[in-house]
Image (spheres, grey):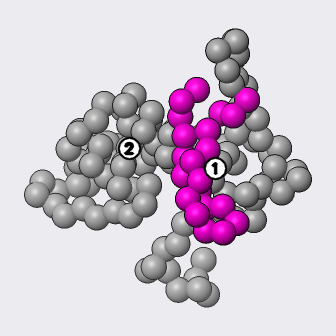
C-alpha cells in the first residue's frame, strides 16, 4: 500500500502518487487487468521478457555458444537481465520483484486513454538487418 512513484504534473512539478490508490487496510485482494491481455501490461511484459532472455542466455551457455571472458552490453530492461545472466547477482525471484516494480511504475506513470490503453509500445530493433531484408 505504501508503494509510490514520481510523475510530473501539468506544471512539470514532481508529484508522488500511490501505485495502488484504491488499496487500504481493509483490501483483501487486488486483481490486475488489461483490455487486451496481461502481457500488454508493462509490469508483466517486462517479467516475461526478462525470464525469456535469461532462459535463452542459459541455453546458449549450455550449448557452448558463449565464450568465457566475453564482453556483454545491454540497455534498458537488458540492464537487469544481463547482470543476472552473467554474474547471478540476484536470485531470479528478487530480480522478478525489481522488474515488476519497475514495470508497474512505468505502467502507472504514463497517462492512459478512456479504454485504459497507451499511445506507446515497445519494439525490438536489429541494427544489423537492412530495412528491405526479411
- Which residues are drawn in magenta? 1-22
Q: Residue at x 49, y 46 (%)?
A: 102
Kindly identify which numbered label has been placed on residue 54: 2
Provide residue 59's location: percent of width, then percent of height: 34, 43
Instruction: Say whether disc 2 or disc 1 marks the residue closer to the N-terminus.
Output: 2
At x 61%, y 68%, the residue is 12
Q: Which SS class for mark 1?
A: helix
Observer able to see residue 97: yes
| Quarter of the image where the C terminus is located | bottom right
Residues at marks 2 and 1, CA–CA distance in whole angstroms: 23 Å
Front-most of residues 107 and 26: 26
Q: Position of residue 60 (x, y in %)?
A: 31, 49
Q: Residue furthest right?
A: 114
Q: Disc 2 vs disc 1: which is toward the camera?
A: 1
Specify whether 40 is left or right of 64: right
Quickly name the residue at label 1. Answer: 107
For residue 98, what is the image quadrant? top left
Amino acid at each position: 500500500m505504501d508503494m509510490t512513484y514520481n510523475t510530473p504534473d501539468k506544471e512539470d512539478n514532481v508529484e508522488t502518487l500511490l501505485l495502488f490508490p484504491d488499496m487500504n487496510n481493509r483490501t483483501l485482494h487486488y486483481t490486475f487487468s488489461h483490455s487486451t491481455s496481461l502481457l500488454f501490461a508493462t509490469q508483466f511484459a517486462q517479467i516475461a521478457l526478462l525470464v525469456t532472455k535469461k532462459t535463452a542466455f542459459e541455453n546458449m551457455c549450455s550449448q557452448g555458444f558463449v565464450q568465457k571472458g566475453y564482453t556483454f552490453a545491454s540497455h534498458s530492461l537488458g540492464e537487469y537481465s544481463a547482470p543476472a545472466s552473467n554474474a547471478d547477482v540476484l536470485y531470479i525471484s528478487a530480480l522478478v520483484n525489481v522488474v515488476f516494480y519497475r514495470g508497474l511504475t512505468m505502467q502507472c506513470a504514463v497517462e492512459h486513454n478512456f479504454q485504459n490503453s497507451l499511445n506507446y509500445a515497445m519494439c525490438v530493433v536489429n541494427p544489423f538487418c537492412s530495412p528491405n531484408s526479411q
